[in-house]
Amino acid sequence: MRLIQHLHVSPQNYQAAWSLLKQRYNNKRILFKIQWDRVLDQPRQLLDTTNEYLNAIESQGISTEEADQFIARTIVRKLDKKRCKII
């Protein structure tokens, strides 16, 4: 792991390594962005993939309940306009 590879394995560096890892991987804003980007970038299996990523967002303690209209509109825009007449 490049993030902490510069640290020598030792009890003294454990806290520094843990702090760096938490800063990188325990950031709800970044985790939400990653999951939402996946929703926006998904090419196929729209419903299943959307549910998967929304569940991942909610597992971070971020409610998506109040964003239903935003989510629905985003999904509708992802549909194939040539094959779908509801857009």
Image (spheres, rainbow, N blue to C red):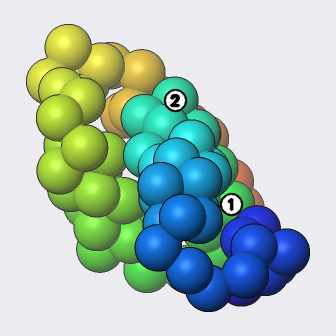
Rendered image: mark on residue 29: 2
- How far across and down, in percent of the image, does residue 35 sit? 49, 53
Q: Nearer the viewer, residue 48 or 55?
A: 55
Q: CA distance from mark 2 to mark 1?
A: 18 Å
Q: Residue at x 42, y 21 (%)?
A: 70
Q: Which residue is mark 1?
A: 41
- The mark that comes first in sequence, 2 or 1, is 2
Horizontal side of residue 81 vs 39, given as left or right: right
Q: Residue at x 72, y 81 (%)?
A: 8
Numbered disc in front, either 2 or 1: 2
Quarter holding residue 42: bottom right
Q: Residues within 10 Å of mark 1 (few under 14, many from 20)?
A: few
Q: Is residue 81 above or below residue 9?
A: above
- How far across and down, in percent of the image, does residue 12 sit? 54, 64
Q: Nearer the viewer, residue 60 or 10?
A: 10
Residue type at mark 2 is: Arg
Query: For the view shown, which residue lies furthest in the top direction?
Result: 66
Q: How many marks?
A: 2
